[in-house]
Amino acid sequence: MELKDFITRISEATGVSGNEEEVGEIIQEAFRTLADDVYVDKLGNVIARKEGKKKSEAPPLMFAAHMDEIGFLVSKAEDGGFIRFEPLGGIDPRTLPGQEVVIKGREKIRGIIGAKPPHVQDAKEREQAIKMEKLFIDCGRSQEELNEIIQVGDFISFYQELTWLKENICAGKALDDRAGVAALSILLKELGNRSHDFDVIAVATVQEEVGLRGAITGSYHINPAVGIAIDVGFARRKGLEKERTLQSGAGPGISWGPHVHPQIFNKLKEIGERDEIPYQLEPVPFPSGTDTYAIQMSRCGVATGLISIPLAYMHTPVETINIKDIKRTGRLLASFCAEADEKFLEGLPCL
Amino acid sequence: MLIKILTEACGVSGREGEVRQLIRGEVEGYVDEVNGDYMGNLFAWKRKNGRPLVMLAAHMDEVGLMVMGIDNEGLLSFSPVGGIDPRVLVGKKVLVGKEKINGVIGSKPIHMQEKHKREKPFPSKELFIDIGAENQEQASREVNVGDYVAFDTATVPLKPGVLQGKAFDDRAGCAAIIEILKEDLPVGICGCFTVQEEVGSRGAGVAAFRVNPDIAFVLEGTTASDVPECVEHRYSTSMGKGPALTMADRSFLSNPRINKYVMDIAERENIPYQLRRTNVGGTDTGRIYQTKSGIPAAGFSLPCRYIHSPVSMLNIEDYNNMVKWMKAILYDIGKGGFPFERID
């Protein structure tokens, strides 16, 4: 599958944390054409293995990107046919009024997130941000119709068609972290032409947005020698601090901090320099919130790295990325796999 | 579908050309004459010399945005055109300028916000449109300051009989008039598709002056606030309960004789209707009834939820009943049923 088609399909598919089957199917289909074997584990992680030259007992190199996205759960169908909901993942309620959604009940139905109309709000209300519990979903249906289709706990995802702003720049939902999943597909594709000593395992993880849960069980099960997560980083835009953001289209961020093994970091940086793959440095003083942190603390500890694809407007339905940064991530990691030999792995324990 | 075609077109107040062309194409062949004026109002005449002459008006324009500046990073600052609550803009897709360049309105990620700041809406001045340009020079090649911006929303059924989309206010009115013009009714009709309603009903008065009708009916999309968090007496209208007759708004006080006349027809024809009960917002009706020495007028509204936002909702049954009601009224007027002498 062409990269643009793949990104479009996985961005538009539903896959709220805990309900990743739909997007998982598309990812499996794509990975099957690129890897030696593909399977799904007990929590739903999609795991693709590309065999290394050595076929040794040595543990594999693991690359993880999460396929789940933020969304909502149905909490109540109310009088008049309105749905109240609870968020899954970190969502700013101010971004919600007027968004389109899909509710995955007995069938998929569409709806609009509504709020009290502005002209019936007093001046004081208008100065306040709208609170999550005041919002509702309107499907244009009666309560009786809704009760036939939905129940408490049904998953709700944004409905958003991916839009190409420029040849390489697209905006849509769930690019956090389907952009990372797309980078995994590039990595697997590149490895078709590159020789690598160790098995490479690409994992599209589940339930990251609610606490890195897929990465916890995934890394336990895979038991890797090296674990590198590919997630998204904050792209620089007006009003954000330069020091805490990455420039869109200027290459992936190579993350640095307590969550990263120094030699993995150095190796990635060295490859970037040598292969002339643009990259940026992303210092993170207090780690939290990507699969890297879970992988690092798996079993008796794993040497980890983190690549961050710059993404603007995180956790909204208009997340914006430059796909050049995805391709660069895939190439960078393919070179890493090709160069991660026995000597490199032997040097990883911190003595 | 006519409503889909009309609502997916862009026509922010002052740039209604695309909608005007579509409407012209739809009505030509069904009417005697189509012409326009200096502001952009479009007139479709049927039985032009027939008396009485009824003016049917709907506005072509929609709320939107205008590009006010392009910054060094290629991001576009904007201002609203018409009444838009800036709180509905975040996280939406837009179309910029004549070429309809794709853009998005983003927001500071939740992770980078201080908690106390989240209690206030995003300040409008901090919002911008991102068209994927890397810098000012690149953006300037595609966009000019002053370009109009419309919401990028597809019109699709939410379920059979309910549509979601933008600009039902008032393309639904335009579609209704087009449907009426396609039928042969025994009365003189001027279908008026007006401009600039959303920025102060600026086209309708000019149009009414030119048409000089015996009576005018305005077909509007209006707010339906029959949603949670609202009290019923402030619903304005309710979706699915039929077209609404306007009692009053900020620009208009209705005429009890006309009200009685049209309500009697609805009762007789078994057409469900409701009375629009808020006192906010102005419409073309307010301009028209004050034109020349006064023109008898009434306002009919289609209840739409979430108007003036990127995505609103319309019940097709309400729309069909609006068309049916209006046709019955026009037929009755043509047969001499309306007591003009008592209005004058």
Image (cartoon, helix red, strand yellow):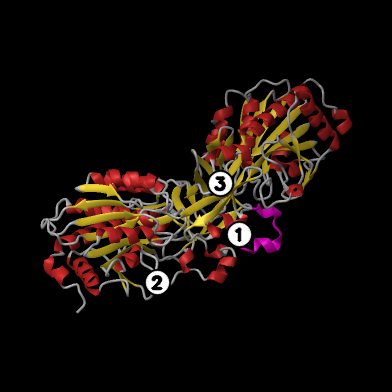
Q: Where is residue B119 in the image (x, y as percent from the top left)?
A: 59, 66
Residue A118 part of the magenta segment = yes
- Name the residue at the bottom extreme: A351
Q: What is the chain identity of the residue bearing mark 3?
A: A
Residue at disc 3, secondary structure: strand
Q: Position of residue A309 (x, y in %)?
A: 33, 61
Dot label at residue A112: 3
Query: In 3D space, how far apart are the residues under numbered discs 2 and 1 (Cα atoms)?
Result: 28 Å
Q: Where is residue B135 in the image (x, y as percent from the top left)?
A: 39, 62
Residue at disc 1, secondary structure: loop
Please tell me which of labels 3 and 1 falls first in the chain.
3
- Name the residue at the left extreme: A54
Q: Residues within 10 Å of mark 3 (few under 14, many from 20)?
A: many
At 69% from the left edge and 31% from the top edge, which residue is drawn? B322
Dot label at residue A130: 1
Dot label at residue A244: 2
Asked whether the beta carbons under mark 3 and mark 1 sit within 8 Å of each other, the answer is no
Amino acid marked by disc 3? Ile
Residue at disc 2, secondary structure: helix
Amino acid marked by disc 1? Ile
Query: In 3D space, how far apart are the residues under numbered discs 3 and 1 (Cα atoms)?
Result: 16 Å
Asked whether the beta carbons under mark 2 and mark 3 sit within 8 Å of each other, the answer is no
Above or below: residue A240 compared with residue B152:
below
Same chain for labels 2 and 3? Say yes or no: yes
Please tell me which of labels 2 and 1 falls first in the chain.
1
Q: In which quarter of the image is residue A125?
A: bottom right
- Of residue B67 and residue B150, the one placed in the foreground of this image is B150
In the image, taking residue B119 as reference, residue B245 lies left or right, namely: right
Dot label at residue A4: none
Say which quadrant the C terminus of chain A sits in. bottom left
